[in-house]
């Protein structure tokens, strides 16, 4: 179950448990074993990474992107935001509203996958161009600011990336 970004997940879970225990649905006996929780996340969407993503999506699909609040309580997103507070976080996946994500009959249409690959490539090019043109005045400054292989391995090794999803922390 997803929770609103302004709502504490532990409080929400406790409220659901209290309600279920109070109403005992259908008169059945009920024992609740609460599980782990994860708070919701609300992305800041006004930075250069989101603009590059919007432009990349338009390039791939030929129309402006639409927005829907989904996936906001994926624990990785909050962990990345806490680790890199200045980062813009984007999770891009290849699917439509009927993809049945995480279900036994999950599917991705080939055309959507192809366009998602175009979006990711366009995004990386557009974001790199936006960041390097505004943040650095010389190639020496760009090279000095790049993380070393050990820096990136330490940050990303614990994460796994699926073929159809690209998780980015853009600073």
Image (cartoon, rainbow, N blue to C red):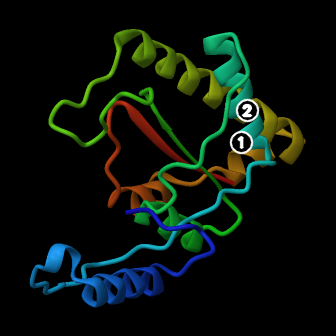
Along the horizontal axis of the image, is 6 left or right of 153?
Answer: right
- Residue plotted at (27% across, 25% down): 107
Residue 153 point in image, percent of width and height: 40, 56
Quadrant housing residue 127 = top right
Q: Say which residue label 2 marks.
A: 52
In the depicted view, which residue is nearer to us: 165 or 106?
A: 106
Q: What element carries label 1?
A: helix
Along the horizontal axis of the image, is 144 left or right of 115?
Answer: right
Q: Dot 1: within a 10 Å radius of its alpha carbon, few (fewer than 14), some, or many (20 or more) residues?
A: many
The answer to the question of whether label 1 and label 2 lie on touching residues, with beta carbons closer than 8 A, is yes
Give the vertical position of 64 relative to 152 (above or below).
Answer: above
Which of the labelled discs sits on residue 5, or is there none?
none
Give the vertical position of 12 relative to 166 (above or below).
Answer: below
Along the horizontal axis of the image, is 166 left or right of 171?
Answer: left
Q: Quadrant of the C terminus?
A: bottom right
Residue 163 point in image, percent of width and height: 33, 31
Q: Dot 2: within a 10 Å radius of its alpha carbon, few (fewer than 14), some, or many (20 or more) residues?
A: many
Q: Alpha carbon of mark 1 to alpha carbon of mark 2: how far?
A: 5 Å
- Residue plotted at (24% across, 31% down): 106
Question: Total of numbered circles in the picture?
Answer: 2
In the depicted view, which residue is nearer to us: 97 or 143?
A: 97
- Residue plotted at (42% across, 27% down): 95
Q: Is mark 2 on a helix, strand or loop?
A: helix
Q: In which quarter of the image is the N terminus?
A: bottom left
Q: Say which residue label 1 marks.
A: 49
In the depicted view, which residue is nearer to us: 140 or 27?
A: 27
Give the vertical position of 102 relative to 78 (above or below).
Answer: above
**What is the residue that sits farthest to the left in this orientation?**
29
Residue 91 point in image, percent of width and height: 51, 44
């Amino acid at each position: 179950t997803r929770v609103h970004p302004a709502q504490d997940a532990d409080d929400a879970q406790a409220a659901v448990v209290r309600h279920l225990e109070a109403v005992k649905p259908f008169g059945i006996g009920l024992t609740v074993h609460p599980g782990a929780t994860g708070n919701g996340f609300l992305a800041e969407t006004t930075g250069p990474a989101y603009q590059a993503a919007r432009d990349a999506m338009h390039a791939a699909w030929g129309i402006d992107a639409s927005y829907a609040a989904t996936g906001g309580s994926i624990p990785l997103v909050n962990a990345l935001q806490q680790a890199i507070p200045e980062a813009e976080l984007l999770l891009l996946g290849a699917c439509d509203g009927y993809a049945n994500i995480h279900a036994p009959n999950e599917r991705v249409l080939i055309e959507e996958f192809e366009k998602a690959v175009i979006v990711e490539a366009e995004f990386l090019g557009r974001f790199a161009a936006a960041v390097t043109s505004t943040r650095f005045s010389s190639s020496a400054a760009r090279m000095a600011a790049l993380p070393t292989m050990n820096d990136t391995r330490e940050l990303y090794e614990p994460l796994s990336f699926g073929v159809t999803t690209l998780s980015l922390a853009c600073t």
